[in-house]
Image (tube, rainbow, N blue to C red):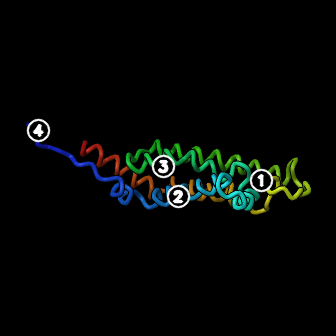
Amino acid sequence: MNMNTTVNPSPQLQFRQCHWILRAYVVFVLLASVLSLSGFFARELHEIIVPFTGWSGLSYYMYTLYFAVVAMFTPRRKLIYAVAVLLGLAIAFGGLDAYQHLWGSKAGRIDSGNPYLIYHPARPAITVALPTFWLALLISPSMKRWIKNCCQDAAQNP
């Protein structure tokens, strides 16, 4: 009879044991997702944030949520890189949007007063700088060490 049993830690314990950057990112993504969905329950709030975030809003963070949550429970480099790739795409689209509105074909357009068509000059801070900040944290040496240590622990304790 095999008496070796392993007890899987609770999700709350796993959340507390994962790297602080990943925990902070998941909490941020949940808040960003609520703001992104605010058009369904708080139209006035949504109209206020759209000039800062654009039409896609903060919705691209929702696409990263799955990979970030799974990485908390099964830390693997590929999962963090999936989040990084999606954030990289968000940065590229945010950069393209900023270029078009600041120097490209949409530069200098007259504001019609429609909140969904207004471009706020601070939009690149939300659409480029913020995802770049999270990308830098998620691929930082500290995160890489945490993933490496978790992978080594998993290999030693199958």
Q: Earlier in the sequence, mark 2 or mark 1?
A: 1
Whole-percent x, y for residue 137 in the image: 53, 58
Q: Earlier in the sequence, mark 3 or mark 4?
A: 4
Q: Earlier in the sequence, mark 1 or mark 4?
A: 4
Give neighbour class at mark 4: few <14, some 14-19, many 20+ (Cα, 10 Å).
Answer: few
Residue at screen point 74% across, 62% down: 48
In the foreground, 67 or 112: 112
What label does residue 141 carry, if any? none
Q: Secondary structure at mark 3?
A: helix
On-image quarter of the N terminus: top left
Question: Relative to 100, does residue 35 appear above or below in the rendering?
Answer: below
Residue at mark 4: 2
Residue at mark 1: 98
Whole-percent x, y for residue 111 in the image: 88, 58
Q: On the picture, is 39 further left or further right than 104?
A: left
Q: Earlier in the sequence, mark 3 or mark 1?
A: 3
Q: Secondary structure at mark 4?
A: loop
> Spatial distance from mark 1 to mark 4, Cα to Cα?
62 Å
Q: Earlier in the sequence, mark 3 or mark 2?
A: 3
